[in-house]
Amino acid sequence: MDGYVKADEMAKRWDVSIRQVQLLCQNGKIKGASKFGPAWAIPEKTPKPTRTGKSKPGRKPKDITGREPL
């Protein structure tokens, strides 16, 4: 398939694990990625997705002393 690469090739380019690329594809974070049987086809020129920086809901930041805030 011209213009597409597999998850293992994209993992090398982005310096992440193959599993991380597969999870990004599965969660819809990589635009244009398609699954063909067990393999993902990813457009060649796709930029690496960035984190949003959001924290998980329900998490409370810890005090630097490690104690619960009053």
Image (tube, rainbow, N blue to C red):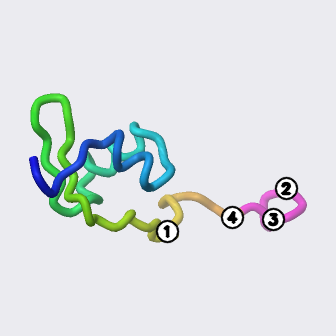
Corner quadrant of residue 59: bottom right
* Quadrant of the drawing holding the C terminus: bottom right
Question: 10 Å neighbourhood of mark 2: few (<14), some, or many (≥20)?
Answer: few
Please name the residue shown 50% across and 51% down the image: 15
Please name which of the two marks, 1 or 3, marks the residue nearer to the observer. 1
Q: Check if mark 3's residue and mark 2's residue have beta carbons within 8 Å.
A: yes
Tell me how far mark 1 sits from mark 3, CA to CA.
19 Å
**Mark 4, residue position:** 61
Residue 65 is left or right of residue 11, and the answer is right
Q: Check if mark 1's residue and mark 4's residue have beta carbons within 8 Å.
A: no
Q: Position of residue 35 (x, y in %)?
A: 14, 41
**Mark 1, residue position:** 54
Question: 10 Å neighbourhood of mark 1: few (<14), some, or many (≥20)?
Answer: few
Residue 3, compared with residue 6, is above or below; it is: below
Q: What amino acid is at disc 1?
A: Lys
Instruction: Please state the extent of the stretch shown in magenta in the rendering.
Output: 62-70
**Mark 3, residue position:** 63
